[in-house]
Amino acid sequence: MEQHNDPQGARVASAPMASGRHGIVGLIDCVWGAILLIPALAIFSSTQVRDLGAASLLAATVVFFGLLRAILGLRVFLVLTYVPALFGVLAVGADLLRDVNLFEAALIRPDPHEAWPVIQPHVQWIALTAALLAAPIWVSFRTRSTATARWRMPSAALATLTVAAATCGAVFHDTVLRAWPLNVISVAAASAIGRDDFISTASPYAAANPRSASASWGASRLPGLHPPSETYILIIGETVRADRLGACGGQRQVGISHEDAIIYCDVMSGSSSTHTSVPLLVSREMPGGAFRVSKDATFMRAFEEAGFHTYWLALQERGIAWPDANTDMFLAIKRTDREILLPSLREVLAQDAPKKLIVLHAYGAHFSYCDRYDPATAAFPADCSKLSEIPDDSTLPEFIRAYDNAVAESLRFVDAVISEAAQAKGSSFVMYTADHGENLLDDGRKLFQHALKDPTRWDTTVPAVVWASDEWRGSNAARWERLRANHGVKVMHADLVPTLLGSAAISYVDERRVAIDLGAMSPAADRTRWVMRRLGEKSDGDQLRRTSSVQALAR
């Protein structure tokens, strides 16, 4: 029997198949676009508030991906945007499941040795996510469909839109460089060519120094007799929560051995993250600003204007606070702060400058805790080999013992600095605080470490210590008594620089009204102690305490 082919019938039969292929490809196109936009909607914006600025960022993201899709075919578009899509999904997951802002973590370029212990428990999920996102790319290459081609748009119209977008981007570059994914791309590109200064300082976590060399604090010494030799020291610790100190309700072995030091147990840090807390601490800024580091000078400029030589000795990178000291040293991390910072401090104290301000930025009790102390001198037995990367209820006691050892070592460093200052020529004054605290599975949320999406009572309540030499106290008896009388009040980081400047008899310009000099007055009982939630957002720090207390009861 003779068979006849029916081309028209074949076309009719293949039409549903083609329609199905178009539907699959169209679905991939839409879902992929949504995946790319979700981070801009859910996590990253200039202020995390749906104001005009944040809407502009979203518009920049839509235009960027839209033009890219219009110019490229779907397959090429999927391949080129695979990494942003993966990073975006992981960022949303980290935000929802771990309370970590992955955008901030990536843009501040964390030390890989610090980042790996946090990432390691989630490697399998990251690999699974990467595989699932690769599946649409594989499907698009296996599916024959005209929907994978470039969008149908006249070339002249596409060129006009591209030029218009590029022009707007150049004119409004401060906004564009904050938009996802251009924020990450700009930082990566500038880093690759070694020119971080190309990045606008409006990109909040860019590695570019925004501080103005001409900024002034309008400072001068108050009238009176000042000692010929003076030394003021600010120690910025790391990851020390107040309730671990014996003087603040913790273990008696954790504390300051100098009995004439004043210890403050209720100090609210400006942020739960080093990269925002330290810039706030050394500035005239308050939590809630849109920029991580402002264009203003640090408080060291006030000391310089008053005739002091300033030093910044640090175990942490320059870009955290962009210090503007006369002399700075950025040193390699060893096991303890005492091993590396004390020799450098002795060198500075031996220099001829009669009036010195010295800032010591230590590494303190940062995780991994067992790396921050010498087991031979540890106050508490902790088997570090048994500790997992993230604690659970069974291993938490070991983590706490290791953390207490790290905190105790941090305070031994403070003791050692005080001893060095006591031996220095002339009058000396030492102030210590930690940049933030730490979460140790304290409530039902089971939070660990710090710099999470939402600050908590435990990662924002830190101690402060003040010590002064006999000569300084003899000349400032009333101020010392006021400092001692205020040891039980509610303090915040913003009070510490005014207190340090006041203790050096330096007047300066400061428009803040809520920050006070603890040596001159006591804070109002009803003042709000603000904590940065993220750039552009702040929270009532004392409200965090009430929230944390409720969570703890629910544990």
Image: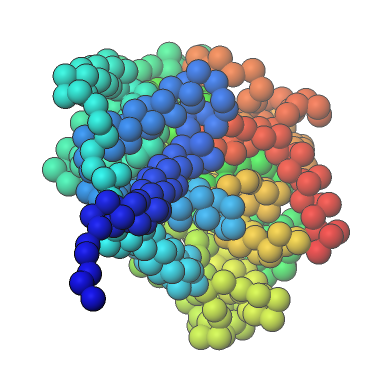
Give the answer, above or below, for where 403 lies relative to 37: below
Picture coordinates of residue 138 (x, y %)? 30, 62
The quadrant in which the N terminus is found is: bottom left
Picture coordinates of residue 394 (x, y %)? 69, 81
The quadrant in which the C terminus is found is: bottom right
Left or right of 452 in this view: 393: right
Residue at image position (73%, 29%) is: 528
The part of the image, by quadrant, that contains residue 257 is bottom right
Which one is in front, 39 or 152?
152
Residue situated furthest left in the rendering: 193
Give the answer, above or below, for where 220 lies relative to 530: above
Residue situated furthest front in the rendering: 1
Which one is in front, 491 or 356?
491
Which one is in front, 135 or 112?
135
In the rendered image, is residue 144 in sight? no
Picture coordinates of residue 191 (x, y %)? 21, 44
Give the answer, above or below, for where 201 lies relative to 92: above
Q: How many marks?
A: 0
Residue at image position (51%, 50%) is: 92
Residue at image position (44%, 39%) is: 37
Which one is in front, 462 or 46?
46
Residue at image position (52%, 62%) is: 365
Left or right of 446 in this view: 84: left
In the rendered image, is residue 193 in sight? yes
Picture coordinates of residue 401 (x, y %)? 64, 75
The part of the image, by quadrant, that contains residue 71 is top left
Visual colour scheme: rainbow
Give the answer, above or below, for where 450 lies relative to 211: below
